[in-house]
Amino acid sequence: MAGHAFRGEDFFSLDDLLSDEERAVRDAARAFVSDKIIPIVEKHHRNATFPTELIPQFGEMGFLGANLHGYDCAGVNNVAYGLIMQELERGDSGVRSYCSVKGGLVMYPIFSFGSEKQKDHWLPLLAKGQKTGCFGLSEPDHGSDPAGMETKAELKGDTWTLNGAKRWITNGTIADVAVVWARTKEGIRGFLVEKGMKGYSAPPIEGKFSLRASVTSELVFEDVKLPKDAVLPKADGLKAPLMCLTQARYGIAWGAVGSMMAVLDEAVHYTKSRVQFGKPIASFQLVQEKLVEMHTMLTHAQLTCLRMGRMKDENKLKPHHVSFGKRNNVRSAREVAKLGRELLGANGICDEYQVGRHMCNMESVYTYEGTHEIHTLVLGEHLTGIAAYK
């Protein structure tokens, strides 16, 4: 890609509203992305591979379950956590997905719903990057409607028998433990399923245009025998996995900001250096209009994220707030990537530059962990009191 030092846009001086610790966490994550991720992500995107060699370094940096406390987690506040997600997605959506899935969808449910034995065993290993986890909720025939899940677990004596399949699972093939949601006689429950158990397989999904530098998998359970204590004891009903998704969607909203920052920075630099008709194309009105639209959407998203983070730290953030953040910021990131690709012209489709990769990645982020339409309906229900899902 064209080499220049990244400059993070901060139009309304939001740095002034961050604590010294929050800025330090952001700066450390920014340097890590610039030094460790940017130089290798093009190769991994081309080869459709995930940089597993970085997983222990994610642990050393405190990126995994960063906003959880104890169990060797970093214990930073939710704004600092969001800034980590922002910077990771500036590198690549797949890298941010690895870390936010692990923190929000694997470590958070173990932390919130697990037994002390489960927490003591898994959380330090996951936090240090010594083990990887995944979250199994979506199924081949049930995405936006998780209540229709067909995966079942049946208890006989002291053994659960698990049958079913999950699909579109980030980290699935490389996961040492899967947090799997299944229907039981008592309702929907969460289970910890370990790699290598008989009848459990996690084949990768091949041929992706998007999130190529990420492991996306199917999980298959064929009479998998689980011990009685594999269940998450405090997770009861569909509310539990939805609480997990709220955690992860919060990180996605911040991540979308990072994608926009990367694309805008590249577009400004490119248009100032690309000369046509005897002058830089940044001097043309239509080019400036696109840059201003990109900048405006980024600035809206930054303000949204900071307010969400402060509310989350004050225990005031509700699921509909997170739906607003995910819906607004990812839609904006999708549009920013499109405009950035236009500004780079033919170069925008080459992976020497970042914009095409971000544009493709945003197509997945726009859909996963609640489609744009589902978040629209969450907000519609908040405004009217009427659920329009059915």
Image (spheres, rainbow, N blue to C red):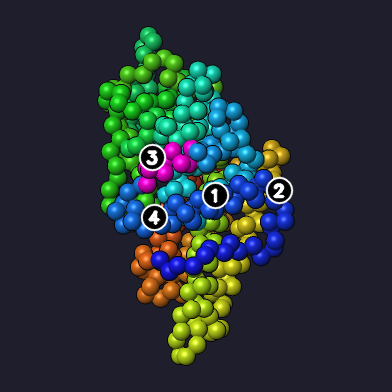
Task: Please tell me which of labels 4 and 3 falls first in the chain.
Answer: 4
Q: Secondary structure at mark 3?
A: loop
The image's mark for residue 41 is: 4
What's under tag 2, amino acid-wise? Ser
Main SS, magenta residues: helix
Residue at x 51% of width, y 23% of height: 119
Measured Cα–Cα span from mark 1 to mark 2: 15 Å
Residue 244 location in percent, x, y?
Answer: 53, 36
Task: Please tell me which of labels 1 and 3 falls first in the chain.
Answer: 1
Q: Secondary structure at mark 4?
A: helix
Task: Please tell me which of labels 4 and 2 falls first in the chain.
Answer: 2
Is residue 214 visible in the rendered image? The answer is yes
Compared to 252, does 117 lie above or below?
A: above
The image's mark for residue 19 is: 2
Q: Nearer the viewer, mark 4 or mark 3?
A: 4
Residue at x 70% of width, y 51% of height: 18
Magenta residue span: 51-59
Residue 263 location in percent, x, y?
Answer: 49, 65
Residue at x 59% of width, y 68% of height: 295
Q: Quadrant of the N terminus?
A: bottom left
Task: Please tell me which of labels 4 and 1 falls first in the chain.
Answer: 1
Badge 2: residue crowd in 10 Å (few <14, some 14–19, many ≥20)? few
The residue to which callout 3 is attached is: 171
Residue at x 69% of width, y 37% of height: 315
Which residue occupies the foreground of this view, 310 or 331? 310
Measured Cα–Cα span from mark 4 to mark 2: 31 Å
Does residue 223 appear left or right of residue 57 in this picture?
A: left
What's under tag 1, amino acid-wise? Ala
What's under tag 4, amino acid-wise? Val
Q: Nearer the viewer, mark 3 or mark 2?
A: 2
